[in-house]
Amino acid sequence: MSEAAVHVRDLHKHYGDKHAVDGLELTVEQGEIFAVLGPNGAGKTTTVEILEGFRHRDSGEVRVLGLDPAHGDRAWRSRIGIVLQATNDLAELTVREQIHHFARYYPHPRDPEEVLAAVGLVEKAGTRSRQLSGGQRRRLDVALGIIGNPELLFLDEPTTGFDPQARRSFWDLVRTLREEGTTILLTTHYLEEAEYLADRVAVVHDGHVIDSGPPAELGGREARRPTVLWTQDGQTRQVRTATPTATVADLAARLGGPDGEVPGLQVVRPSLEDIYLDLIGHTDLDAEADVALPTTRPTTRESVR
C-alpha cells in the first residue's frame, strides 16, 4: 500500500498556557479531498501551517509526502501547492504573466496555457490581477497553487466571500483537480462545501480531532437518527427514532383523520450542520477569536516559493 499523503500523530503546539494543538491525530490518503472543520481558535490554522512547514511543532510525529515538513527542502516544496486565504502578489502583472512567471520556479511545471484553461481564466489572460473580481482572483490563486504540478494542494478557506454561483463553479474546479490525481486538504467554515467536496472530514475542537470520517457517517449512527414530529391535542410532539416509517404508520393508525393524514406530520433528518454543532457543543463559529500570534507564514507568493 502507498504511504499516506499526510500522517500526524500526537501533535502538540503551545503558546504559553494556550494549547493551540493538543494531541491532534490526522491521516490524509493519497488522491482524496480531505476537509478540516472547526470553530475559530480550534487549532486548524496552526495545524495546517505545521503541515506546510511554516510553523514548528513542540512535539509529535508529522510526515507530509513521506518527509518531516520541519526539514522540507526545495525539492519537497516543489511537490506541494498552497492557496492562502488572501494574496496581493504582483498586482500589475496580467493573469498570463503571473502564471508563466511562477511556472519558472518549479522543475516540472504544468503547461501555463493549460492551467489558464483549467481554472477558467482564458478570457481574462490579458487582465491585470488587480482588476479581477473576487472569484476570478481566487481562480488565479489556485492557478498559482497548481502550476508546479503538486502532489498535495492546501486550500485555506478557498471560497470565503464567494456568491453561490462562483462557489459552485470553484467546487467543480477542485473536483477536477482531484480527478487528475491531486490530493487536496482544505479548511472551511462552510458545511455544505465539506459535504459536497470531501471524501472525508475531520472536526477539530480544542486542539484535537473529535470525530472524522466520510461526511455521511460523521457523528455515528445515533447522531443521524431522524425525528418524527406531529401535532396532538394542540401541542407539537416529537420522537427521535431509528424506524421513522414504523413510527409514521403507528401515528397514522392512531391519529389519522378520515383522510389518513396526521396533523403537522414531519420527518426531519439531521443535517451535517446539526451533527457538527452537536459535536462541538454548539460553539458559536464566530464567537471565538483565533489566538493573536506573530507568524512566520508567508503573506506573498514570492516568499512561499
Image (tube, rainbow, N blue to C red):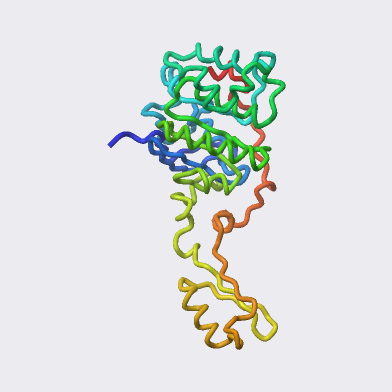
Identify the residue at image location x=48%, y=44%: 198
Q: In which quarter of the image is residue 256?
A: bottom right
In the rendered view, tell whether residue 80 sits above or below residue 9.
above
Where residue 70 appears, as percent x and y from the top left, is 45, 25
- In this view, the residue in front, 290 or 105, is 105
In the rendered view, tell whether residue 283 sits above or below residue 255.
above
Where residue 77 appears, as percent x and y from the top left, is 46, 21
- In this view, the residue in front, 149 or 65, is 149
Where residue 59 appears, as percent x and y from the top left, is 45, 34
Identify the residue at image location x=55%, y=20%: 304
Q: Looking at the figure, which quarter contains the N terminus?
A: top left
Q: Quadrant of residue 255?
A: bottom right
Identify the residue at image location x=68%, y=17%: 128
Whether residue 148 can be seen here: yes
Q: How many numbered circles does the render carry?
A: 0
In the rendered view, tell whether residue 135 sits above or below residue 250.
above
Whether residue 15 can be seen here: no
Where residue 40 appears, as percent x and y from the top left, is 63, 43
- In this view, the residue in front, 178 or 191, is 178
